[in-house]
Amino acid sequence: MALFNRTKREINAKIVYFGPPLAGKATTLHFIHRKLKPEYRGAMKTMGGQMDRMLFFDFMPPELGEVNDHRVRFHLYTVQGEVTNPSTWKTVLKGADGVVFIADASPESRTVTRDSMESLRGYLQSYGQELEKLPCVIQCNKSDLPDALSPEEVARVIASAGFPAVKASSRTGEGVLQVLSTVVKRIMKELREQGHDGERDGMFAAFPAQAVPVMPSDDESEPVGREGEKVTTDAETIEGAAEALSDALPTLALGGRVAVTPDGSLRVPLTARCGGVEKGFVLSISLAPETPSVA
């Protein structure tokens, strides 16, 4: 869900790019990052080692202006390559305001794409969340291949005919910005319509329809929406995003009381936070008397 930073007077929304390995998730994020002006976006950041490597950055669409003196910032997340630990995706998906499912449109990837969609639904259900209740767009990647499946065929493969499906290629950039525009507008629509308390209702009622950020369409195709309807996007240019939030930078804090083990070692609980993601660690310290130096 969207988070309010009243100190900075910002509203933060999270978009997760999910999909099977090698479908183009990281390539997509890097393409978007390159297309945004540096003065309006944060730096691309990574977390993790060679396996389960998370990528993320934030951007602030200037077209939105301010909402009751609050600016709106979007945070884009994905995990690169094949994920070895399912908890990585669960952590990244927690609190998502919208999802872009990167489907592999190559015919030989039907099964892995379908399995990935089932995994996405399962991860969200572990939080009591249903995919159908989130703004979601299907990015049909590798559509530039000669034998690629059409967006309608991809939607049937993953049993997601209710979501907009866009012909795309992260390699060439076809459809990538169109997908981002669509999911951003749907998130903004949800925020305007589904405020929960009085303050939130008042804030999001102030969003004018023309303030929804849009990206320039880089092809003439249109996403296929519910029951075959076309979901159109405007041709205005989004030049969004300022520098990264300071609270998106990694921080480390003491997570509890320090314990002494029977062998005299110390166990220090630590909590690492970055961009809304939180994970606990334990630091073990072995104590030994200092060896006196010999003159």
Image: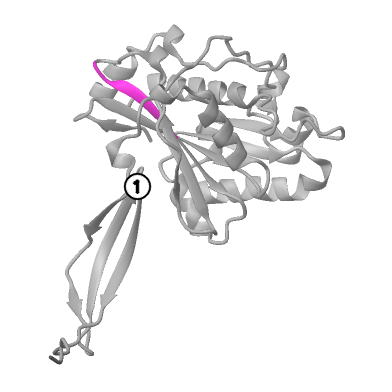
* Residue 216 at x, y percent in the picture: 58, 15
Q: Residue 188: percent from the left, percent from the top?
A: 44, 21
Q: Nearer the viewer, residue 146 or 104?
A: 146
Quadrant of the drawing holding the N terminus: top left
Find numbered disc 1 in the image and state the secondary structure of the residue it sits on. Answer: strand
> Would residue 241 be found to the left or right of residue 247 on screen?
right
Coordinates of residue 261 in the picture (x, y in percent): 22, 84
Q: Residues within 10 Å of mark 1 (few under 14, many from 20)?
A: some
- Is 218 on the left or on the right of 290, as rendered? right
In the image, residue 104 sits, relative to residue 138, either above or below, namely below
Judge left or right: residue 154 versus residue 279: right
Can residue 130 be found in the magenta stretch?
Answer: no
Q: Nearer the viewer, residue 58 or 269?
A: 58
User: With respect to residue 295, does 69 lie above or below?
Assistant: above
Nearer the observer, 276 or 193: 276
Above-or-below relation of 202 to 27: above
In reply to whether residue 71 is colored magenta, the answer given is yes
**Left or right: 47 with respect to 21?**
left
Three-letter amino acid code of the residue under disc 1: Cys
Rendering quarter of residue 283: bottom left
Q: Which residues are magenta?
A: 69-75
Q: Is residue 125 visible?
A: no
**Is residue 116 shown to the viewer in this render?**
yes
Magenta part, dominant SS: strand
Direction bottom: furthest residue: 294
- At x 69%, y 25%, the residue is 174
- x 52%, y 13%: residue: 237
Q: Which residue is mark 1?
A: 274
Position in image of residue 35 (x %, y %) = 54, 24
Which residue corresponds to the image point at 64% horizontal and 45% vertical from the top-left? 117
- Count the marks: 1
Give 146 or 49, whichever is nearer the viewer.
49
